[in-house]
Image: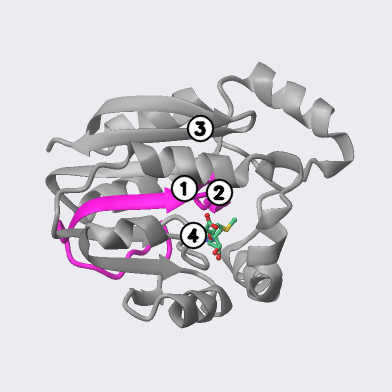
Amino acid sequence: MPRSPQENEALFDRRAATYDEDVRRPTGVLVGYEVSLYQAAAMILLAAGSEVLDVGIGTGAFARPLAADAARVSGVDVSAEMLARCRADHPSFALGMGSFLQIPHADRHFDALVSSFAFHEVPPAERPRACAESARVIRRGGRIWLLDIVFASSASLAEASEELHEQWDPDEIYPLVGEMDAALRTAGFSQLRWQQTAPYHWAVTGRRVT
Ligand SMILES: C[S@@+](CC[C@H](N)C(=O)[O-])C[C@H]1O[C@@H](n2cnc3c(N)ncnc32)[C@H](O)[C@@H]1O
């Protein structure tokens, strides 16, 4: 059963103090965390002066390398404690509470939306709405880059749950490439390009065309 938004907020508030340490020694589905961040960040091409939003920014690991090109990096998260950590390390970021389902910014405000390891926190039934909410805040022609724990098929997901065995969290319901691809296209993204970055991680980029 997926966690409720309140359970997610409480979980990441508790994890915030040790999060950066923990992901330096990733286990289970997070194995390859740093390589994935590096590879996904290498896919990102920002025009100088872009307005960028990181959804589920956490402590700011994915947004950090984007700050050199962006005019401004904004970030939203459901956890006040993760945001406090991010604010301490990245005082120039414009941070606030928000989620994939409620992004507190105007329509078409951003040139690019990025996110790492946060989309899977959205309950499956709400994922199409999360894609639509993401599209809402990106200008026409703007881009999305998502990196997450995603599986190519139900069979590869089932294999991973066996491989990882006791490290597999039955409360997490990870997206499949095909489902996410369809939801992003329905929300108005096209030119979708997928790249596997680690055994359990995929990154996708797309352009908002409508
Ligand atoms: C595994 S952490 C990833 C943090 C960071 N992006 C990174 O790559 O290190 C997941 C983050 O997503 C946030 N989160 C949980 N549910 C969310 C939702 N529905 N929308 C946006 N962010 C969410 C959590 O508070 C947490 O900061």
Mark 4 closeness class: few <14, some 14–19, many ≥20 residues within 10 Å = some
Q: Is 154 on the left or on the right of 210, as rendered?
A: right
Q: Which mark is residue 202?
A: 3
Mark 2 Cα shell of 10 Å, populated few (<14), some (14-19), many (≥20) = some
Residue 95, how many percent across, how many down? 36, 75
Is 94 located above or below residue 140 in the figure? below
Distance CA(mark 2)–CA(mark 3): 18 Å
Report the residue marked by disc 2: 123
Under 8 Å from ligand 1: the CB of mark 4?
A: yes
Task: Give the amino acid at mark 3.
Answer: Trp
Whether residue 125 is visible: no
Residue 127: which quarter of the image?
top left
- The magenta stretch is 99-125
Tell us which disc is closer to us: 3 or 4: 4
Closer mark to the observer between disc 2 and disc 3: 3
Instruction: Identify the residue under disc 1.
Output: 126
Measured as percent of width and height from the top left, residue 89 is found at: 47, 77
Asked if the stretch drawn in magenta spans residue 38, the answer is no
Is the C terminus in the top left, top right, bottom left or bottom right quadrant?
A: top left
Up-down relation of residue 58 to residue 181 (above or below) = below
Q: Quadrant of residue 100?
A: bottom left
Q: Nearer the viewer, residue 201 or 70?
A: 70
